[in-house]
Image (cartoon, helix red, strand yellow):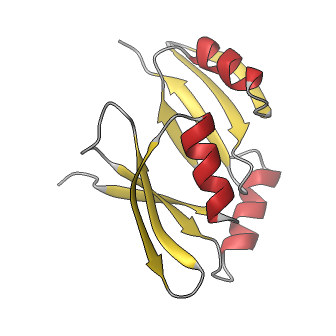
Amino acid sequence: MRIHLTSVFVDDQAKAEHFYTEVLGFVKKHDVPVGETDRWLTVVPPDEPDGVELLLEPAGHPAVKPYRDALVKDGIPLAQFAVDDVRAEYERLRGLGVRFTQEPLEMDDITFAVFDDTCGNLIQIATQPQ
């Protein structure tokens, strides 16, 4: 068993597509209309086109808003992305205007930081031990 697809709920798919591709650097894999306004919109890392897909899923279900609001209020990230160097990625993203809620922090042999994805979520980036 392996993870093939996971998702984050987003308030606006067009805004999320821009942020996740133009700012974070993912590439669009699938973009299929679903209904009148929604899309099956997935992104992948540029160096792993056949890797795990991230679905930028519309946040229309009534349970999504209270769930995400509670996570954000408590400072809990919805997802974590691995990066080679958290401090370098923190500086790169800050330079692009990304708002961080947690600056890089080291705990044992893991460094992490948390940012606002502009679409209703907090996302953590982390460097895992080698």
The one of 127 and 95 positioned closer to us in this rendering: 95
Seen at 62% across and 63% down, the residue is 13
Seen at 17% across and 55% down, the residue is 1
Seen at 46% across and 63% down, the residue is 41
Residue 106 visible in the current orientation:
yes
Q: Position of residue 127 (x, y in %)?
A: 49, 20
Q: Position of residue 115 (x, y in %)?
A: 71, 36
In the image, 40: left or right of 61?
left
Q: Position of residue 35 (x, y in %)?
A: 51, 87
The one of 103 and 106 positioned closer to us in this rendering: 103
96 relative to 56, above or below:
above
In the image, 72: left or right of 10?
right
The one of 27 and 124 positioned closer to us in this rendering: 27
Seen at 57% across and 45% down, the residue is 20
94 relative to 71, above or below:
above
Residue 77 visible in the current orientation:
no
